[in-house]
Amino acid sequence: VNGMAKPVIDVVITNHNYNRFVPGAVESALLQHDVLTRVVVVDDGSDEPLAGFDAEDRVRIIRSEVAAGVAVALNLGVAAGSAPLVVFLDADDLWPRDRCRYLCEAMDQADLAYGGQVIFADGDQPDLDPSPEQWAAMGSVPAGLLSGTTLLRRSVLERLGPFPATLRKGPFAFWMAVARKAVPPVREVALQRAVLLRRSHATNMTRNNSQVGDYF
């Protein structure tokens, strides 16, 4: 990142009836510091088609008329890109603007890097560009291996294959379980820093710790 060409990253955003949140997610992906992000939004059978991104040449919308599930949406998004690095963002979440830069720097020669999440309440507007003092005050945030906290090399996605399309819930967790048994092993780096701002709202799939446990 420092003094070199910016890393190019494909951002896959999956959406099902979260159209009101998508503009914020897209903006937080496009405004990442010191990297070049290209966004693919996969609209998985939402009741109303997404609109409003025609003027942005770094955003592509893929529309599925019938909801096929998050695994299929993730696979469509990955296949639509070509960048050497791939990241995932749920439509209702946001990223701090240093998120991808920090993960790129941490990853070095590894296959993937991941950090931690901070949960915010729907209706709040978290600061996406915290000052060094704000980061210091936040302190260490435990790393958690979630789709929205991870940066992956496309090569490892190609080596291990797509997300299992038959899984309606937890395809990333399942894929990571397979990845951790791969030969040669997938090389991971954990960053104890917030890289995902996860929105808490009435229609979250996982709204509390018990539901998160059930999800995994």
Image (tube, helix red, strand yellow):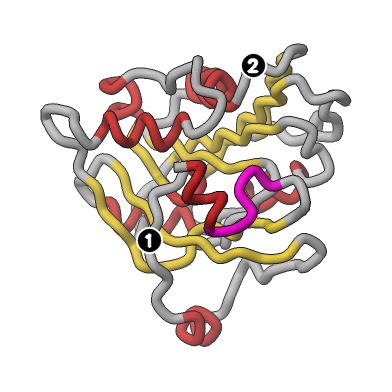
Vertical arrangement, residue 188 with respect to residue 101, above or below: above
Q: Looking at numbered disc 1 in the image, what kind of residue is underneath it?
A: Ala
Task: Name the quadrant of the C terminus.
Answer: top left
* 182 to the left or right of 13: left
Task: Name the quadrant of the N terminus.
Answer: bottom left
Point out the tag, 1 or 2, that comes first from the N-terminus.
2
Vertical arrangement, residue 151 with respect to residue 74, above or below: below
**Residue lying farthest to the top in this orientation:** 65
* 151 to the left or right of 170: left
Front residue of 137 and 123: 123
Residue 98 place in picture, x, y as percent: 50, 62
Front residue of 114 and 23: 114
Q: Looking at numbered disc 2 in the image, what kind of residue is underneath it?
A: Ala
Residue 109 place in picture, x, y as percent: 20, 46
- Which residue is label 2 attached to? 68
Classified by dominant secondary structure, the portion drawn in magenta counts as: loop
Vertical arrangement, residue 153 with respect to residue 134, above or below: above
SS at mark 2?
loop
Front residue of 208 and 87: 208
* 55 to the left or right of 62: right
Residue 101 in magenta stretch? no
Residue 108 place in picture, x, y as percent: 24, 51
- Which residue is label 1 attached to? 143
Residue 207 in magenta stretch? yes
Residue at 61%, 22% (x, y): give it.
69
* 170 to the left or right of 2: right
Q: Magenta residues?
A: 204-209
